[in-house]
Image: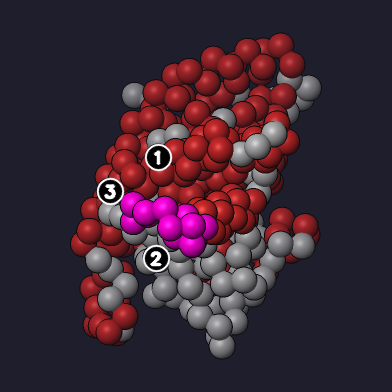
Amino acid sequence: MQFDAELLLLALAPVFLACIGWEAWHLARTRPQARLYNWYDTVCNAALALMHQSADKLAWLAVVPVYAYVYRHFRVIDWHPGWLAFAALFVAQDLLYYVFHRCSHRVRWFWAAHVVHHSSSRLNLSTAFRQSLMYPIAGMWAFWTPLAVLGFPPKQIVAIVLINLAFQFFVHTQAIGKLGWLEYVFNTPSIHRVHHACNPRYIDRNYAGVLVIWDRLFGTYVEEDPLEAPQYGIVEPLDTYNPLKATFHEWGSMFSDVARARGLGNKLRALFGPPEWATAFHAEHARTVESDRAGLKSTGTPSRT
Ligand SMILES: [Zn+2]
Ligand SMILES: [Zn+2]
C-alpha cells in the first residue's frame, strides 16, 4: 500500500496533539500567571485546522492536474531519484515558501488568507493549526508551480509542501529559548516568535519556512531581543474565537474597502497594496465619519448616535 502524501498532516496529528498536551502542561507549571493557553482559542485553532485540511484536500484534486500538465510539457530538468534530487526539491520549495510568505504579508490579497494565522493574541503550538481555508482561492498553489518546471512530479511537490508545513508546527512555542548555532540555519521558535509579533521593530520580519538563510540573505531577519517581548497578534486586533469570522473578516473588509475607495488606483491598492494601506484607509475613514458627526452636531442636526 502506498502512503498518500496529502494525508501527511493528518497522519502526524497524534504527534502534534501530544506536543500540545506537553506544552500546555509544562507552561501551566512554569508560567502559570502567563495563561498562554485558553480553551476558546485552542478550540478555534483546531476548528480552523479541520476547515483548512478539508479545503486543502479538495484543492489538491484541482491543482495536481495543473502541476502534472506543467511537468509534462514545460519541465527543464529530468532528475535521477536520490538525495540530490530531494535536496534540490527541498531547497527550491523552501525558497518559494519564503516568497509566498513575504507576499502574504505585503500584498493584501494574500494577507486576507494569511491573517488568520496571525490574528490570535496568543502564541503556542496550537497556533500552528490556525490556517485559512481560503489559501486555495488566494492562489497559494501557484507559488509551487515553478517546482513542476524544475522537473519535480506533482506527488513530490505535494509531499514537500506538507513536510515544510509539518516542520513549522514545532516553531510555534514559547517554551523553548534560543537554540545556538541552529539559529543561523533553521527557522526556530525564537525566530518565529518575532514573526508573530506586531511590535514595530518585529513586524513583517522572519518569513522563513524551514531555512532562515533566506531572511538573512534578503534582509528580513531580526533577532528576538530579550529586552523587548513580542506582542502577539495583528495591528487591527480581531476579538473573536469564531473560526468563520477569523477566516472571512479580512476578505469582507477588503471588498468593502474596494467599494468605498475612490478611483481605480485606490481600488487596486485596497486589493493588492500592503496591509498598512488598509490600516491608514480605515483611520482616514473613521476621521471623516467623526468630523461629519461633529459637523452635524454643530449645525444642530440631530445625530443618531
Ligand atoms: Zn506570516
Ligand atoms: Zn506561524
Is there a contact, CB below 8 Å, between mark 2 and mark 1? no
Mark 3 lies within 8 Å of ligand 2 (Cβ measured): no
Amino acid at dot 2: Ser
Give the residue at x 34% y 56%. 305
Give the residue at x 63% y 60%. 204
User: Disc 1 or 3, which lies upstream in sequence?
Assistant: 3
- Specify the quadrant of the image occupied by residue 88: top right
Residue 171 seen in the figure? no
The answer to which of 104 and 10 lies nearer the viewer is: 104
Q: Position of residue 29 (x, y in %)?
A: 24, 82
- Specify the quadrant of the image occupied by residue 37: bottom left
CA–CA distance in space, label 1 to label 3? 10 Å
CA–CA distance in space, label 2 to label 1? 18 Å
Q: Quadrant of the N terminus?
A: top left
Q: Position of residue 44 (x, y in %)?
A: 27, 51
Tag 1 residue: 248
**Above or below for 282 versus 177:** above
Dot 3: element: loop
Residue 60 seen in the figure? yes
Label 3 Cα neighbours within 10 Å, binned few <14 / some 14-19 / many ≥20: some
> Which residue is farthest front?
300
Range covered by the magenta-colored residues: 294-305
- Residue 90 magenta-highlighted: no
Q: Position of residue 173 (x, y in %)?
A: 41, 68
- Residue 303 magenta-highlighted: yes
Tag 3 residue: 242
Tag 2 residue: 121
User: Disc 2 or 1, which lies upstream in sequence?
Assistant: 2
Q: What colouring style does the render use?
A: secondary structure
User: Disc 3 or 2, which lies upstream in sequence?
Assistant: 2
Amino acid at dot 1: Phe
